[in-house]
Amino acid sequence: MPDALVTEPTALFALLAAAMGLVFWLSTLPALEKVFEYLPPVIWAYFVPMLLTTAGVTPADSAAYDWMSRYLLPFALFLLMITVDVPAIMRLGKIALIMMLAGTVGIVIGGPLTFALFGGWFNDPEVWKGFASLSGSWIGGTANLVAVQQSVGASAETLAPLLVVDVVVGYGWMGVLIFLSAFQNRFDRWVGADMSVVESLNKQLQEIDQERTPVTIATLAVIVGMAFGAAVLSRVIGDGLPALGDPTIISGSTWAVLLVVTIGLVLSFTPLRKLERPGASRIGYFALYLLLTGIGAQADLGKVLEAPLYVVAGVFWISIHVIILFLVAKWVKAPLFFVATGSMANVGGAASAPIVAGVYLPAMAPVGLLMAVAGYVLGIYAAFGCAYLISLVAM
């Protein structure tokens, strides 16, 4: 392959940022609304840079990618965690939390079972690392995917087909859940669901603070400065701690992520959580999506073409998740609303869970967001556990 057109790290970083900006601008155009409804901007933030590298515009390896991978993830996770409203999540009630946990358990159990059945079909000896990374995406979303990917050292080539599985199977399941919304009354009668739980939750949501304030230069400086400080400090400390597991599951990157997540959650109980009013979490998501462009630029399109083999495995994995969800729903008499929202809180994360929740009960979209937030808080720990189980099967 000839040399890439753009190789200088700063220029490369600028190109990726511009590509992401173009994608998100296009997502605001009414004519493309339907396209981005089914294929959200975050997906294009990965695949557009991959196409640029395939076309020879950007290189598959660069110091820019190394810097982005090292610092943007803890930067994003710190901002996402300090803005978590833990008391609001706890007010969701036991049924909501049980269904969200059931979805998590389904993914954790399904991961090693799926790899045990399908792992031998793939030629890549490190394919288990891709499946481990996918478990992160299906237990909380993109942030957890990148955290596990860095922890186990999955290459962009190994990860590429699993991201196709994430899109095809994950969003395919989202479509099924939206279709099932027409049958929620039948399902609720079948399980004997107590709908007073949903009515009570709706009243509690009215108490949640949704206030937003314009961001000032001073506030922006505090948010960005504190987040970069936390990112660098977590990396320094994490690199000094011993790696655990054979193959390695708890690496320096893992320690850094666990440190920044845990400290961020602790700080969410302080006045720092008010930084969400000017949009601290939005800055965190911006950094996360920018990181995703760097991962996409390292991927090989040829690997993506092998995706059908992986999609079958993904369908089997998601089926285990679904079976456990429905069994638990029958046991605790959970409305289909909580089944669908709890599933998307895991598989889809913050981008999809509110959409599904709103389809079932339009006034309850905030429930989907809160359950998704709970999903990625729990998922950052559960995904490492699932990755470890998959690694044991791969040995």
Image (cartoon, rainbow, N blue to C red):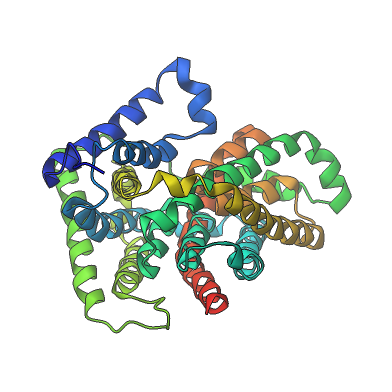
Q: Nearer the viewer, residue 380 or 20?
A: 20
Residue 25 occupies which quadrant of the picture? top left
Taking the image as drawn, is residue 364 in sight? no
What is the total number of numbered labels drawn onto the structure image? Answer: 0
- Compared across the picture, whether 236 is left or right of 351 comes to left
- Compared across the picture, whether 35 is left or right of 212 comes to right
Taking the image as drawn, is residue 274 in sight? yes
Residue drawn at the location 51% of the way across and 49% of the way down = 349
Rendered location of residue 354, percent (x, y) = 55, 40
Residue 361 occupies which quadrant of the picture? top right
Rendered location of residue 16, percent (x, y) = 25, 39
Residue 251 occupies which quadrant of the picture? bottom left
- Compared across the picture, whether 1 is left or right of 358 comes to left
In the displayed structure, 252 sits above or below 110; it is below
Rendered location of residue 217, percent (x, y) = 14, 39
The quadrant of the picture occupied by the N terminus is top left
